[in-house]
Amino acid sequence: MALFVVAHGAWSAGFAWKKMHPLMQARGHRLVTPTYTGLGERAHLARPDIDLDTHIADILGVIECEDLTGINLIGHSYGGMVATGVADRARGRLVQLIYIDAFAPNDGDSALDLLPSAMRAQRQAGADGFIPPSPMPADTSAEDVAWCMPRRRPQPARTFEQKLRFKNGPLTLPRHYIYCTRHSPDDRFRPFYERAKREGWGVHEIDSSHNPHITCPQVLADLLTRIAV
């Protein structure tokens, strides 16, 4: 059995991984999907001063309180920022870091820094300090859009603006990058996939738009099983 912990994407929450739980269990794995402060079922805790460090602390808290070790840590989308921070701070509890169509930051990067310049203006906070959810990819089924969109919540701008700071030097643990191939020409995640290839990480492609845990969960579950430790 492998243990997977998920750092989910922006505006989302643990609920978005519900299709994956029975699939991973059937393959003999445990999947843990915490929700960040201020999102999903924790939306009642939302406030503008929540930042990236808050979300990193959310995942660390679950790992520490449940005494989880041997973790395959997944970062999806914005969750790559969170997962990288968790990997820096909880190195002894992880066996590998798996990015799924995610930001893969270096020390000193923020999520906004890593966006193409043309997209930064689209991530402007409203007067309340929150950034509203983006639409789901066009190939998402109407049923899945109806399930997910009402549950997606505005996210504090500080989570995108705060720069990640490593506390323990460069990361040395094994890493994989799963790249979703159905993107528009302004693909924000391709550069991280190319970096992964240059640096010798495990690299994988999946025929999916940005949310394979929603649109093709069986394919994703099979791939995670193949690379699990």
Image (spheres, rainbow, N blue to C red):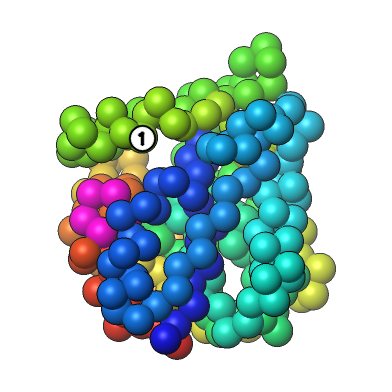
Q: In the image, is residue 160 part of the stretch drawn in magenta?
A: no
Which residue is at 29% across, 49% downward?
Answer: 214
Give the image location of residue 23, x and y in percent.
28, 67
Horizontal and vertical percent for residue 32?
A: 51, 64
Residue occupying the point 46% across, 55% down: 76
Kind of residue at disc 1:
Cys
- At which x and y percent is residue 177? 40, 69
Q: Position of residue 24 (x, y in %)?
A: 34, 71
At horizontal 37% and vertical 52% (from top left) the residue drawn is 18
**The furthest residue to the top:** 127
Instruction: Point out the image quarter for the N terminus.
Output: bottom left
Residue 3 in view (yes/no): yes
Magenta-drawn segment: 213-217
Q: As rendered, which of 63 and 79 lies closer to the eye?
A: 63
Residue, disc 1 = 148
- Could you tell whether 204 is left or right of 12 in the image? left
Q: Determine whether the residue tagged by mark 1 lies in a helix, strand or loop.
A: helix
Query: In which quadrant will I find the C terminus?
Result: bottom left
Judge whether 59 appears above or below 128 on screen.
Answer: below
Residue 190 visible (yes or no):
no
